[in-house]
Amino acid sequence: MSEPAPVAYREGVLRPVPRFWLLFDIVGSAIGLLLTLPVTFTFAAGTMSRWIPDGVASYALVLLVAVILWGAAAISRIAPALALIVAWVGALLQMACGFSPGAYDLAILGVLFATSAWGSIRLLWLGGASALGGGLIAGLYMSLVNEQDLIQDAATGLRVAVLAGLLGAVSVLTLVMAWGAGLLWRLVLRGRSTREAQVRAEAIAMAEQERVRIARDMHDVVAHSLAVVIAQSDGARYAAVADPAQATAALTTIGQTARAALSDVRLLLAQLRHSEGEGPQPTLADLETLYAQVRAAGVEPRVTVDPTPPGEPSASIQLAVYRILQEALTNAIRHGAGDVDVRLSWYADAVHLEVRNAVPPAPRQASPEHGHGLIGMRERAQLVGGTLSAQPEDGAFVVRAALPVAPATA
């Protein structure tokens, strides 16, 4: 079970900690208390006081100090700021009673670790200051509480001062090492959190790209067919009385186009369900069918291919050419007036595409789908490394695209 990365919070407020880690800290601190107390009492080092005689009161005070320190360790993960305060209370009580350091003081190391691992930035530095200051105070305290013994063993007070300095250095080093270990763990958690955030961001970006791709594919598949269906249904309605045969032909075209669109939608849905598989995609060979659908909608495409493809273009280029032409011709059916000119120029390194249709004197208001179609065409071109422009020009609307072509195959 992973730990949450350190987050900013107000000192004194409980951190959100999983129940497992909370129970782990409580049980671990209880075990630490049960293990260190017998060691302290056995060696009697923790009950030697300059001011309190050995006895029940002395043992009770040692027990109280140990409970306070290990209690601070128990809450150090969920409330490191409060734990630091409680640890200082226990340490000051220990010094006030004149007790020498005992095994239960190991709990202080856990508290300092917690301040740098899970505390706020302010608490991080307070923990470091506590490690430095507490170590110096502990060294001075240990020299003073044993002052008489030190003077008996040392010839001069200078040797006492040197020993006090050594004790202080050892105390500072021990406490700072615990604090530094927590700082390293904090960096590990922060790095893990950063990586997880990057993975989430990449997943969101991929999902967004997939949504855009689905929207683009649905538009490409459905919009053209619906444009043909709308044009044919309008023609059939007007021809139903005057020319029943023409109305019947229009209805036949509507049925064929709708069935083709339904087939394309089913293919797209199958690809979405099985993204690892690729179904058949339109190629240059399908352009004649596309032109026939445009003619059936009442628009004559005048197609020029010069020069012709020097070889078999890649599948991605063929798909891009087909989809761009499909959308450009769909826009010509919806918004144009009269026939449309299509020109394809295939070169060794690129294919140039141009679709030009006349604009009616009073242009119809562009629909939202029209805007999405232009965006989709540009995206199609960009996907293969090409460019696309679409703009009015000399009374016509012109779509131009330049798509790079990989080396042709024979």
Image (spheres, rainbow, N blue to C red):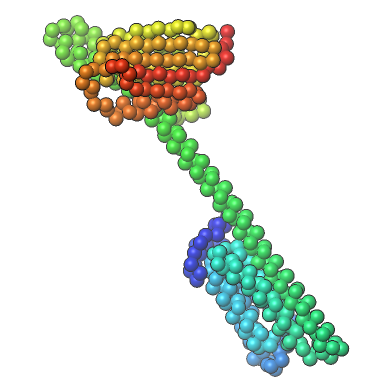
> How many numbered marks appear?
0
| Front position in the image: 340 or 271 | 340
- Most extreme residue toward the left is 241
Q: Residue at x 66, y 76 (%)?
A: 134
Camera sees residue 217: no
* Left or right: 2, with 216 as reference point: right
| Front position in the image: 246 or 38 | 246
Q: Within the image, what quadrant is residue 96 found in?
A: bottom right
* Left or right: 2, with 317 as reference point: right
* Left or right: 364, with 308 as reference point: left
Q: Within the image, what quadrant is residue 217 found in?
A: top left
| Front position in the image: 243 or 130 | 130
**Residue 348 drawn at (x, y percent):** 54, 12
- 344 above or below 57? above
- 198 above or below 40? above
- Most extreme residue toward the front is 394
- Most extreme residue toward the right is 155
| Front position in the image: 406 or 66 | 406
Q: Residue at x 71, y 73 (%)?
A: 172
Q: Residue at x 33, y 18 (%)?
A: 393
Q: Within the image, what quadrant is residue 26 found in?
A: bottom right
**Residue 108 drawn at (x, y percent):** 65, 73
Camera sees residue 58: yes
Image quadrant containing the C terminus: top right
**Residue 22 drawn at (x, y percent):** 55, 65
Q: Residue at x 73, y 70 (%)?
A: 173
- 179 above or below 381? below
Image quadrant containing the N terminus: bottom right
